[in-house]
Amino acid sequence: MSWFSAIRDIFSKTEVTEETFEYESIDSYLAKQAAREALGDKDDVAYKCDQIIDATYHVDELRVEYDMVTSYFTDIQTIENLPEEVRAEITATAKKISMLESETKEFLHSDDRISDADFRMIQGLEKNLTEIFSQLKELEDMDMKIKKDLKNLEIEKNTQEYIQDNVEDQQHRLRMFMIVLGGTSAFLILVLAILGIVMQANVMIPILLIVLVVMGMTAFSVVTFHKLTYQYKLAQKKENKAISLTNKVKIKFVNNTSTLEYLYNKYNIKNLRELEYLYDQYTVMVEEVRKYQKNSGDLREYSDALSKLLFNHGIKDPDIWIKQTPALVDPREMVEVKHSLNVRRQKLREQIAYNESLRVEGLKDIEELLKKDPDLREQVRKELEVYQINV
């Protein structure tokens, strides 16, 4: 590189040809559905394969839940279409169960503990609570970890932006210094030359000294400028890496948050701690109920009768309705049950649609990758074959 080119670089704006990433908010990221700027390397293949696999498994799990909710609707329709005499028998049995439960609650003053609805909910979940606690804890821990990762990545991005701004400021000051140095040196040389001519004196030595100082300062400035340019490019690469990782983490954030929100809505809680509290209160109440019903089997007798009656008339999961006797007695309560199921089903549809879009997008991107580089086909095949997913 010539001296002229080196000095010219100092006074020109640093250009970085490396492709940059667009930083997006989570809302913008959802709207664009995780659009990616670059395709074609092996990291993209692994990333897209992971995206397809994760989305596929999420869809499978969500559809199982969706089918279960749909089966509840089927049971409701079956109950509502039963003959009048059968409905009357179901209603009468459900009323007796509700009456016994009310008497039990009154005796125990259970309103000092948890609501009747929460009691029935925990009662219905009791067999699966260990699994539910584990699932919620895992999701909440993951939520905290993802938020921490996003926060750290944001800090890293801002740090690298600050470094770039600082480097640009130093480069600007260096340019101004060179301008002042050049102007001052030229002025001094001109003054010495005029004095030499007027006074007939030899001013070559002072002029040479000024030139040597200028050359030394120029060399120092060139080296410093290129160090700053390297720092700028390195900071920009680190910023781009932080933004790239942020955009990847957001897919996990969206899926994890959506699943958590669905489970919170499903169990009508704000967090795992609240569910644990409800369970603790439930266990106390159950113990008191057992004491109260020690010499009475009426509630069990009517519950068994209702379960058998519903099963004999085509209800797939009659035990669920033992915990929903108010809905069998009061049509308004049944409307509330339908509404709750509708909300759950709508949320599930949205999650299924979102993950389907991720899966389709991933498959399209994989196809584009294979068109550009057929040699990646074996890598893609190995990634997806384990999970029986075909491109």
Image (cartoon, rainbow, N blue to C red):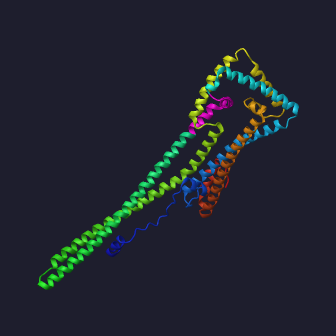
**Magenta residue check for 285:** no
Residue that appears at 85% across and 38% down: 81
Residue 359 in percent (x, y) is at 65, 53
Residue that appears at 33% across and 75% down: 4
Q: Is residue 152 above or below residue 161?
A: above
Position of 73 compared to 149: left or right? right
Task: Kindly tell me whether residue 1 is visible in this rendering.
Answer: no
Position of 211 compared to 370: left or right? left
Residue 375 in percent (x, y) is at 59, 60
Q: Is residue 298 above or below residue 186?
A: above
Residue 285 in percent (x, y) is at 64, 23
Tell me the quarter of the picture where residue 335 sits.
top right
For the N terminus, which image quadrant? bottom left
The secondary structure that most of the magenta stretch takes on is helix
For the C terminus, which image quadrant? bottom right
Tell me which segment is drawn in magenta. 114-138
Tell me the quarter of the picture where residue 275 sits.
top right
Task: Kindly tell me whether residue 169 is visible in this rendering.
Answer: yes
Residue 62 in percent (x, y) is at 68, 44
Q: Nearer the viewer, residue 325 or 49?
A: 325
